[in-house]
Image (cartoon, rainbow, N blue to C red):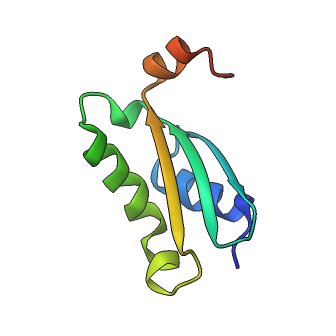
Amino acid sequence: MVSPDQVEAMIKAELPDALVYAQSSDGEHYEVTVVSSQFQGKRLVQQHQLVYGAVRQAIDTNVLHALALKTYTPESWAATGGPV
């Protein structure tokens, strides 16, 4: 099992400027929101690939089973009224 803090740390290690919000009800399935300037100009699938790359080892070792992602650039996040 992985804690939400550990998931956040894995993502921040690859996307240092990211704001990451992770939550889980069971320690294996996560809902994660990531805000990063590195998403600028990238399609949604490319954004998700960056995040999955950050947690690949946890997925490959079955520590992390599922990740529901929402990704935003800082500008699109601000437009949602999300906290900074």
x, y (%) of residue 59?
A: 48, 77
Q: Is residue 22 left or right of residue 79?
A: right
Residue nearest the observer in this picture, 54 or 62: 62
Q: Position of residue 27 (x, y in %)?
A: 72, 71
Q: Is residue 48 above or below residue 18?
A: below
Position of the C terminus by quadrant: top right
Q: Residue furthest front?
A: 25
Query: Which x, y percent locates residue 1?
Result: 70, 79
Figure check: 22 above or below 80: below
- In this rendering, the count of numbered labels is 0
**Extreme-bottom residue of the structure:** 61
User: Where's residue 3, x and y in %?
Assistant: 74, 67
Left or right, residue 30 beside residue 37: right
Name the residue at 63% across, 21% down: 82
Q: Quadrant of residue 29?
A: bottom right
Q: Nearer the viewer, residue 43 or 6?
A: 43
Residue at screen point 48% across, 49% down: 69
Identify the residue at horizontal 45%, vertical 62% (top origin). 54
Q: Is residue 78 above or below residue 70?
A: above
Does residue 36 lie above or below 48 as drawn? above
Name the residue located 58 percent from the left edge and 49 percent from the top edge. Answer: 32
